[in-house]
Amino acid sequence: MKIPFFLKIALAALPTLPMSLAADEPASLSRILFGSCLKEAETSPIFETILAHEPELFLFLGDNIYADTSDMAVMRAKYDVLAATPKFAELMKACPVHATWDDHDYGINDGGAEFEKRDEAQRVFVDFWGDPADSPRRSRPGIYEAKIYGEAGTRVQVIMLDTRYFRGPLKKGEKRVGGVYYPNEDKSVTMLGAAQWAWLEEELRKPAEVRLIGSSIQCVSEASGHETWANLPFERQRLFDLIGKTKANGVIILSGDRHWAELSVAREAVPYPIYDLTSSSFNQIHPRGTPTENRYRESPKTWHRENFGEVGIDWKGDETVVKLLVRDLEGAVVIEREVPLRELRVGAVAAASPEVIPVKLRSDCPDYLWIKVSPSAEYEDSFAIRVEVDSEDGGSSRVSGRLKLEWAGISADSIKNSSYENGVHSFGFGLNRRAFEGSELLVTARGGKVFRIDLTSPDFRQH
């Protein structure tokens, strides 16, 4: 396909150095911006907002174009359209840039290792992003890369994963709100592939104070039908275990893909709380406007319009604070969380995780937490469990329920979640007599305390 003359001019205006080295590197990083999902043929005014916030580093987390093709001429032409976008070209010159791909710029929707043109797509990718001739991404399979910015005491390690080239097959089932994918218990199915896993271990052993892991898909969020690391639970846990094994402090995951923004955090089976800040999309509106279930959601708020993410670092030695933000098209903050860096250290999970208090009787609850049991108005031989939380201390309340049932010899594990801002709120959860061991509610209330309510207790099984 012949490139039009005006596109050649636009391409010529781009730097000839690799885009990750196109601008002067700052002595230390304190403001890293990122985002994902860009329809190259549509307007993208958000780049002007991004430039106004003066990023010191920018990370593209995938779906940077919507190629969806095995025709490399078509793919290159779509990259040409992106390159001709003035504010995009300006961003490329404004700061160092790193990029990974997701399925649409990889070439096939929800694609993995089965994509026959993955090698050709990789060549197109590294050509567009300006990798030099000796770049490892030109000589090895996969587009993963890493770089450390700053000196000792203020080092930021950027790790960009490739969750497409090596990823094994996904398990499909009945379609849910989020899609057709379900957790695959086959330990042989990989997300990163052996070579990338070995490389990642080496990278995590390098010294750094803050580590930003770019993953094109969400890592912490639960499996609700969409693409997520939770669809390969052994690979997800392998990542968490590797962080602990290598004593890699300061890890924060940045992700895209969903066409909405949210913040998730894993607090169990991790070396310390693992945050996953999702930012998506640059210029697309989510058609449904509501998120899928996610019991790891740290904030009750999600954002479903144009957005970009920001990681701000206030360097103060042991008192360093990392600010996780999502900004809208005008630059206003719509999601935010401050995380003391000392909490992101191997072994800090006990101090950082909330106290968990077992509850088997309603009388075990404090005066600001009420558990009410009554016959269900909807289902025969069932109970309605209602939780009321008074979070007047200024905190937010979160309730998640895990209901395990056995019906006609089939077991089911049902998850229900809800989050609230301040005040008194109610949460309904149906429980029938077939519930067996493992059914519970987790209620986060004042002071960050978590009450684990055993729904199999007789006190919660009477009319």
Image (cartoon, rainbow, N blue to C red):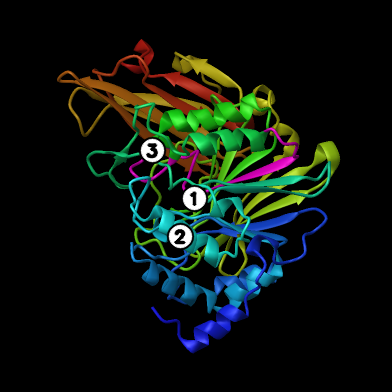
* Image depth: mark 3 or mark 1 in front: 1
**Residue at left offset 59%, top offset 40%:** 275
* Label 3 element class: loop
Q: Quadrant of the N terminus?
A: bottom left
Give whichever of 264, 90 is nearer the camera: 90
| Residue range of the region highlighted in magenta in the rendering | 205-228
Q: Position of residue 66 (x, y in %)?
A: 40, 65
* Label 2 element class: loop
Q: Which residue is mark 1?
A: 216
Crowding around mark 2 (Cα neighbors within 10 Å: few <14, some 14 to 19, many 20+) is many
The numbered disc on residue 223 is 3
The numbered mark, 2 or 1, whose residue comes first in the sequence reads 2
The Cα atoms of the two marked residues, 2 and 1, are separated by 8 Å
For badge 1, the amino acid type reads Ser
Relative to 267, say whether 167 is above or below. below
**Seen in the image, is 37 located left or right of residue 456?**
right
Q: Which residue is mark 2?
A: 63
The question of residue 117 being in magenta is answered with: no
* Label 1 element class: loop
Relative to 43, say whether 354 is above or below. above
Q: Say whether marks 2 and 1 touch (CB < 8 Å).
A: yes
The numbered mark, 3 or 2, whose residue comes first in the sequence reads 2
State which quadrant residue 223 falls in. top left
**Residue at left offset 45%, top offset 54%:** 102
**Residue at left offset 39%, top offset 61%:** 286
The numbered disc on residue 422 is none
Give whichever of 280, 336 is nearer the camera: 280
Crowding around mark 3 (Cα neighbors within 10 Å: few <14, some 14 to 19, many 20+) is many
Crowding around mark 1 (Cα neighbors within 10 Å: few <14, some 14 to 19, many 20+) is many
Q: Say whether marks 3 and 2 touch (CB < 8 Å).
A: no
